[in-house]
Amino acid sequence: MGKNKNAQVSDDMAGQAAGAIGGLAVVFGILAAIKDKLGLSWPTTVLLTAGTLVALGYGAWRLRAAIVRLVAGEKLPAAALKQEAAASVLVDPQTDAEPVPAHPELTAALTTAGVISREQVIRADEVTVTDVPTGTLYDFLVPKGRTYEDVEKRLGTVAGMFGVTRLHLTMERSRDNERRVKLLKLHEPPFTHPFPAPTRQEIETFPGVPFGHDVTGRLAGVPTFDKASLLVAGMTQMGKTTLVNGIITCLLIAYGEFEMYLLDGKFCGLTKFEKKAVRYESSDDPAVFEDMVDELNRRSDNRYAKIKEAIQNRQPAPKFTPVIFIVDEAADFFAHDESKEGKEQARRIAEKTRSLVAKSLESGISSVLMTQRPSTNAIPVMVRDQFLYRMCLYVASAGTAKVALGDTYFDTVAPINPALLDPDIKGQAVLFANGRSTLIRGFNFEDQFIWSIVDEATVKQQEEAISAPSKTPIEHAIEILRNDGVDFMLTADLAPALGITESDPAERGKQLSALLGINSGRTAQGRGYKLDDLIAAARSSS
Ligand SMILES: Nc1ncnc2c1ncn2[C@@H]1O[C@H](COP(=O)(O)OP(=O)(O)OP(=O)(O)O)[C@@H](O)[C@H]1O
């Protein structure tokens, strides 16, 4: 029996050896044939053949997997996809072995838009779809590993997947979950129906300064106007002046005490607010603009000096009354006539304006510049780049929008192209603030409403002036000249009115200039003080 078994083993081995030799001979023969046919060396032939066989094997495996998925995929899409991508960290582990019903519309839209990968789904049980008066609201969670920002970054593409434009979509993030997205798809193009102007109470309760309505009719604006500056650009007749009139009205209601400097480059765009302005000019002369900028820069320097002094003396930072400088049609002031002097003036004005806007952060002097010519260099880039808030109404091209909103605007999160706005719906604007874009429509208040707000603010200002603590000598001097209705007063007349009893003219002059903090000037009438100089000195010391 043992002998028979041994003989059997030795027979098997001989058979296998013969098979192996036969196999080797066949492989060798095939390789030789390939070598002959292709005229390659032996090592290349061996490597090429091995590589081809491996690739064929892989292809067959992929084909088989695809067929299996096709057959099973209809029934268990999420589970099957999950298995396939078991190694991927992006797969939603909540799904486990349970099949997850996907929300078909959102999953398809977000997958094709590249927001989520093909292995991921928007779970139907994590989606709420509600019809609201303006559109359809989708409230959903993106899969784990994704956030709100993944959707926001591709909002334009997502809009395309919904069959609407970027202007039809707005989105909000949630405070409770980074994965939650609230997406509103408007039924109609934005602002197809006007929203009524807000009431005084609505403006008062808005947290910040409202600039207009958003596409859902809610108030939208900026959290504060403190330490901020605003550039508003848009083609002519698109609603800039109306929008800024609305903003000033809201500032008067919501912002508390502030001083307003107005320069009406279009002559009557800001006239309604003249009564409340500390200084109002209606002119397109660059010299007037430069003079106002000079005055404000002096005030700004003075405020900086006071801040520095407080730090040196280890005292709390001084509080300044906010100042807002508003210019309608600013581009004209930066233009020049190509002459040497004209170019020099334009360069000087640009630099002074840049400095004013840049310093607003600490000085509390904010600037609002409007332009209907948002072409390259209408507002010098060095000035434009200083603006924290930017708004652009309808413009003819994306290139022009960049002039107003910044060269890199279209690389920001979810930009809105102002060239796509409907130019027939006036007052629409893209507000770009704190890195985010919002489509708004400015308020179009009734004149009656604006007048009542201006009157109220002026009365309040006068009451505060009466109840204010005692005036400084310079304020007292201004009041004396104003009460007399004169633009100039001799030192000999002003000194006694301010309580200086000295009779020697030289000594009296010295005492008065020490009291006021400025020197008198010589005129044809004699030495004395101009009302304008006193006002300028009073402003630059506050
Ligand atoms: N929000 C709005 N709702 C309704 N009508 C508006 C709105 N904003 C502006 N308009 C209307 O559009 C027209 C142009 O407005 P506005 O004068 O403010 O534009 P503008 O851009 O300042 O023009 P321009 O630069 O030519 O002076 C006006 O008839 C105004 O009543």
Image (cartoon, rainbow, N blue to C red):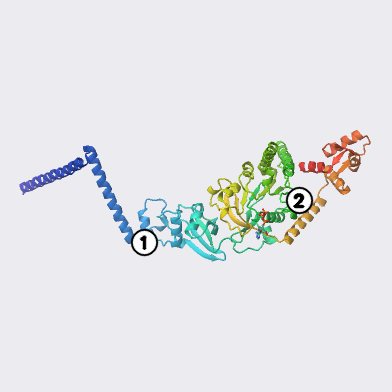
Question: In the depicted view, which residue is nearer to us: 322 or 523?
Answer: 523
Question: In the depicted view, which residue is nearer to us: 67 or 304?
Answer: 67
Which quadrant of the figure shows ligand 1? bottom right
SS type, badge 2: loop
Measured as percent of width and height from the top left, residue 518 is found at 82, 37
| Quadrant the C terminus occupies | top right
Residue 127 visible: yes
Measured as percent of width and height from the top left, residue 238 is found at 64, 56
Residue 256: which disc?
A: none
Q: Is mark 1 within 8 Å of ligand 1?
A: no
Residue 103 visible: no
Figure quadrant of residue 506: top right
Residue at left offset 76%, top offset 41%: 540
SS type, badge 1: loop
Residue at image mark 2 = 277
Q: Residues within 10 Å of mark 1 (few under 14, many from 20)?
A: some
Measured as percent of width and height from the top left, residue 267 is found at 73, 51
Residue at left offset 18%, top offset 44%: 30
Measured as percent of width and height from the top left, residue 50 is found at 24, 43
Residue 76: which disc?
A: 1
Q: Is residue 361 left or right of residue 28?
A: right
* Circle nearer the N terminus (1, 2): 1
Which circle, 1 or 2, is nearer the viewer? 2
Q: Is residue 377 left or right of residue 6?
A: right
Q: Is residue 41 left or right of residue 18?
A: right
How far apart are the alpha carbons under marks 1 and 2? 70 Å
Figure quadrant of residue 40: top left
